[in-house]
């Protein structure tokens, strides 16, 4: 049961991921989660007003089932398989988080100062959640895929556009983390 609490080692999860991606490549499918929103909009009838949603969404049922499985698996992992011990943070991380005004009790993976219903109604919450969510959604559409789709499927298929997207994701993440986030956290 300890392996369920601590996660699978790389030598188990890596080959399993490789097997799944190999099967998907063999079946002509690509892995990615961001296209699911397009599928849901098409199911809801968005194709009546926008040609982007006019396609045979029924061919994407497998992807909807995959995302539903990921959500269900995440709920099972969070409720039944999570380790009750607090997460282990280095003293430097605790110090850095404290200097930015975040709780340092190591009880939360996501700081409640940003990720809570009370915080959502604050200026900081709107900036981080609403504006941040919009930018992630816009970037995903602009890049024609999400980080998982480009980094897992695109790179394994040796797509240059995915390599550029992944480099852009990482550079953007580093830029925001080190130059923008510290200022926004103090709002």
Image (tube, rainbow, N blue to C red):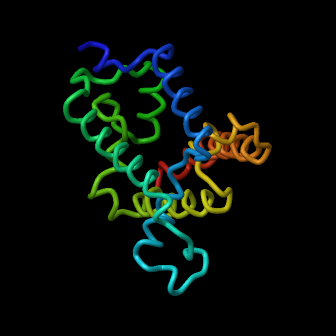
Q: Nearer the viewer, residue 133 or 39?
A: 39
Is 14 in front, or is 184?
A: 14
From this view, report whether residue 170 is shown above or below residue 125. above
Residue 50 in which image quadrant = bottom right
Q: Is residue 125 above or below residue 179?
A: below
Query: Which residue of the protein is positioned furthest toward the right in this rendering?
Result: 160
Q: Which residue is found at the position 50% from the left and 51% from the top? A: 33
User: Of 91 and 149, which appears nearest the observer?
Assistant: 149
Against 46, residue 39 (above or below) is above
Lateral position of residue 177 relative to residue 128, left or right: right
The residue at the far bottom in this view is 49
Q: Using the image, determine if residue 156 lies above or below residue 131.
A: above
Identify the residue at horizontal 25%, vertical 23% (top origin).
Answer: 83
Relative depth, front residue between 136 and 184 = 136
Give coordinates of residue 172: x percent, y percent.
Answer: 67, 46
Residue 70 visible in rendering? yes
Occupied quadrant, residue 150: top right
Residue 113 at x, y = what percent? Answer: 34, 48
Residue 179: where, in percent of width, then height? Answer: 64, 45
The percent position of residue 146, horizontal first and vertical second, equals 58, 50
Identify the residue at horizontal 33%, vertical 37% (top origin): 103
């Amino acid at each position: 049961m300890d392996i369920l609490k601590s996660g699978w080692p790389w030598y188990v999860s890596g080959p399993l991921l490789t097997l799944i991606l190999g099967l998907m490549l063999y079946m002509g499918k690509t892995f990615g989660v961001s296209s699911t929103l397009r599928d849901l909009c098409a199911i809801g009838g968005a194709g009546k007003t926008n040609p982007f949603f006019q396609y045979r969404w029924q061919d994407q049922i497998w992807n909807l089932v995959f995302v539903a499985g990921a959500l269900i698996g995440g709920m099972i992992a969070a409720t039944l398989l999570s380790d009750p011990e607090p997460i282990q943070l280095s003293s430097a991380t605790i110090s850095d988080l404290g200097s930015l005004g975040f709780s340092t009790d190591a009880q939360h993976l996501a700081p409640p100062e940003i990720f809570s219903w009370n915080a959502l109604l604050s200026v900081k919450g709107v900036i981080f959640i609403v504006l941040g969510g919009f930018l992630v959604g816009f970037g995903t559409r602009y890049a024609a895929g999400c980080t998982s789709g480009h980094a897992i499927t695109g790179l394994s298929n040796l797509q240059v556009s995915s390599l550029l997207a992944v480099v852009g994701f990482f550079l953007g993440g580093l830029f925001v983390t080190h130059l923008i986030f510290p200022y926004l956290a103090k709002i």
